[in-house]
Amino acid sequence: MNQYVTRVSVWFYSEGASPSQVMGKLMDLGFKPVRGAYDFVYEHRTDNMTEANLGSAILEISNALHKTLVGFKVLYNLDTHLSNGEDDYVPLEDIDAELEETRKEIEMIENEEKE
């Protein structure tokens, strides 16, 4: 299965839109916030994508991203590549789940110490 991903880095400007505004807009487009070298990732849904289809998909998502961020005074960088299943990013929902588990463990330890 050839699944491509488009990764996005965003550079904010203090006179521009807030990070939460930008994040909301990107998530509306289907980008997922991630931890890693990039800030967001878009997973192209088409399996076994041809080079012609990939070019169209990149152009479509790039145009949508540009149209969405007009006036926000942010800079961004796109990188599309074939996903190998071991990408250099971790989806934030995975991080949130890990944090919740860690919070529970800390709470248990604190409760044991109080006893």
Image (spheres, helix red, strand yellow):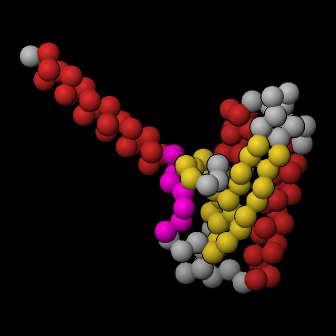
> Quadrant of residue 101 in the image?
top left
- Identify the residue at image location x=54%, y=57%: 89
Where, quadrant-wise, is the N terminus in this rendering? bottom right
Instruction: Write down the quadrant of residue 15 in the picture.
Output: top right
Q: Is residue 100 left or right of residue 95?
A: left
**As drawn, which residue projects farthest toward the left?**
115
Q: Is residue 56 left or right of residue 5?
A: right
| Residue range (magenta) | 86-92
Q: Is residue 32 above or below residue 101?
A: below
| Quadrant location, the C terminus | top left
Query: Quadrant location of residue 11?
Result: top right
In screen coordinates, is 113 left or right of 48? left
34 relative to 17, above or below:
below
Residue at x 79% of width, y 50% of height = 76
Residue 111 within the magenta-colored segment of the rendering? no
Q: Nearer the viewer, residue 44 or 23?
A: 23
- The percent position of residue 9, horizontal first and vertical second, equals 71, 51
Residue at point 76% right, 59% down? Answer: 78
